[in-house]
Image (cartoon, helix red, strand yellow):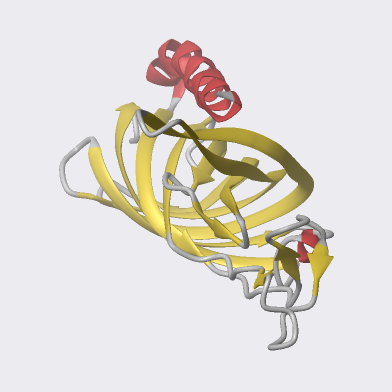
Amino acid sequence: MRRICYCLAIAAVMLVCVPFAAAQASFDLNLGFGSARAGSNGGGIDEATFGPCIPSPATPTCLANPSLKGVFMGFGGDLMLYKHVGVGAEVAFKPALSDYGPLKYRQTFYDINGIVAPVNEKRVQVQVQGGIGAAKTGFTINQSFCVGTAICQSVSQSAGSATHFQVHAGVGIQLFVTEHIFIRPQFDLHYVPNFTDQFGRNSVPAAMIWVGYSFGDRS
């Protein structure tokens, strides 16, 4: 629910800016898919006690912490206040829950960026982004129970989350297939202090393919 609220907040801010963008410069809304990578931190969670443990053949109930990988989905937008300078915001998250020992987890990255576009022509725009935000790892636990032999049910509930400050940098090439529709391959780096509490490193490389629509005057 909180992730949805963040997305709606970003969308609301961007939509408020549309009239200004149409009059002054350009405003983009985009949807993306990609992936982010970070190895395991080598730790584990005991499936019986949910306490920390070190995976080994001698501890069969200790389930290893996973690597960060898989498909990410993103929403974002940017407002070019001038031809070569703008601001933007993005949220990227795993749409499906993944295993984290005996738990399930979903990773989300939020960032607000300054944008420099050293190349901004009719059919191509090069974006260099830099900003700050947050990285949230949300955990859930699945529990199953039965009432006699008549009804069996599985219930998921929140088991807490870990949120860290992050610094974001990205480079993308925005290619316009029509006057307003574009595709932007983008490479990102998220630096998240203390991210080794959940995964194997604080630096998380990522790549996304964004598809979007540009409003306003790009001339």
136 over 219 or under it: above or below: below
Q: Using residue 83 as the reference point, say whether residue 107 is left or right of it.
A: right
146 over 200 or under it: above or below: above
Picture quadrant where residue 150 is located: top left
Q: Using residue 119 as the reference point, say whether residue 206 is left or right of it.
A: right
Q: Using residue 128 as the reference point, say whether residue 149 is left or right of it.
A: left
- In this view, the residue in front, 96 or 134, is 96
Picture quadrant where residue 66 is located: bottom right
Residue positioned 61% across, 41% down in the render: 140
- In this view, the residue in front, 182 or 202, is 202
Whether residue 208 is visible here, answered yes or no, is no
Residue 90 image position (x, y, % from top left): 53, 39
* Viewport quadrant of the C terminus: top left
54 over 120 or under it: above or below: below
- In this view, the residue in front, 211 or 66, is 66
Residue positioned 74% across, 86% down in the render: 58
Residue positioned 38% across, 34% down in the render: 149
Query: From this viewpoint, which residue is outermost toward the front?
Result: 148
* Viewport quadrant of the N terminus: top right
- In this view, the residue in front, 129 or 192, is 192
Whether residue 65 is visible here, answered yes or no, is yes
